[in-house]
Each structure stands twice: as C-alpha cells, then as structure tokens.
Image (spheres, rainbow, N blue to C red):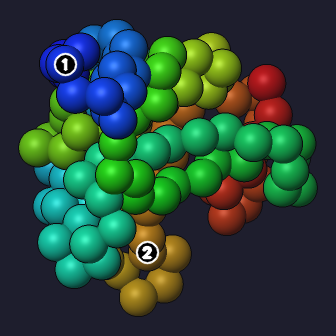
Amino acid sequence: MTVSTTEPNRTAAPTVREGDERLVQLTEAAGVKVRALIAREQQGDFLRIAITGGGCNGLSYKLRFVREPKTGDILVRSAGVEVLVDSKTALYLRGTVLDYSSKLIAGGFKFTNPNAKASCSCGESFSV
C-alpha cells in the first residue's frame, strides 16, 4: 500500500504487518458467514477482531467490519477473509480459532482461545 507523494491532500497508507493463521484462524464455516455478512452489510472489506475489558470474566471479544486498516495492525488472511488485529489484542488472541454455527440454539460465532484460563458459558468473555 503506497500513496504517491505528488498528491497534496492524501496521507500515507497505514503500516500494516502480515500475520498468519498462527495468530487467528477462521474455520470454513466462519469464513463463509463473514464473507456473506461483508457482502450484505457493506460496512467494510475487513473483519476487525478486538479484545476489550468487560464481560463476566474480564475480557470480551468484539467483531466489526472496517473499511481500512490502522497503523500497526496485523493482517491475517484466513478462509477467504482479511482479518485485522491490533498488537494489543494479538497478545491475547494467539492460536485462537473462530468458528460459526447456524444452529438455532447455541449458534453464532464461537471463539476457541487456548490462552483463556476461564470463560463464561456463552463464550463471549474470558480471563487469562
């Protein structure tokens, strides 16, 4: 991603590092669902995974679509999806698998995080 310096009103593209599926991996089911949501929602071409404070176990996962990366992001390509992770989130995410189930009960996106010491029953928050 390079931007010409001859265009006066453009800023340089953010510096993004390439990551791999050792950081985060999407199952094929998760990839299919995310790609469908990207097409339907038209909120951006990247899936951002973040970990924030909150939830019943102290940390919770956040998923959202974004149009472009931020400086310092790590870009992981998995199951046909471009995933962005900030460096702070990467500390807690390494080795995580994101899956999707269309089951009526207990369906949706599910994280399997080997770094989590405990997680809540819904799987949306964890502690390390």
Residue found 66% across the figure and 56% down from its top: 124
Residue at far left of view: 80
Tell me: 34 left or right of 84: left
Pointer 1: residues within 10 angstroms few (<14), some, or many (20+)?
few
Q: Is residue 109 above or below residue 50?
A: below
Between 38 and 28, which is closer to the camera in this rendering? Answer: 38
Residue found 48% across the figure and 21% down from its top: 71
Determine the secondary structure under disc 2: loop
Q: Position of residue 47 (x, y in %)?
A: 36, 49
Counting residues from the N terminus, which is met first, the one under dot 2 or under dot 1? Answer: 1
Between 50 and 96, which is closer to the camera in this rendering? Answer: 50
Q: Position of residue 51 (x, y in %)?
A: 66, 39
Q: Is residue 120 something one can see in this rendering?
A: yes
Tell me: 120 left or right of 24: right
Q: Amino acid at mark 2?
A: Gly
Q: Amino acid at mark 1?
A: Thr
Residue found 19% across the figure and 19% down from its top: 6
Q: Which residue is mark 2?
A: 107
- Tell me how many marks there are: 2
Please identify the quarter of the rendering in which residue 79 is found: top left
Q: Is residue 26 something one can see in this rendering?
A: no
Q: Is residue 21 above or below residue 65?
A: above
Residue found 11% across the figure and 44% down from its top: 80
Q: Position of residue 95 (x, y in %)?
A: 44, 20
Pointer 2: residues within 10 angstroms few (<14), some, or many (20+)?
few
Q: Position of residue 9 (x, y in %)?
A: 35, 35
Residue at far bottom of view: 104
Q: Is residue 117 above or below residue 82?
A: above
Determine the secondary structure under disc 1: loop
Q: Which residue is mark 1?
A: 6
* Quadrant of the rendering where the C terminus is positioned: top right
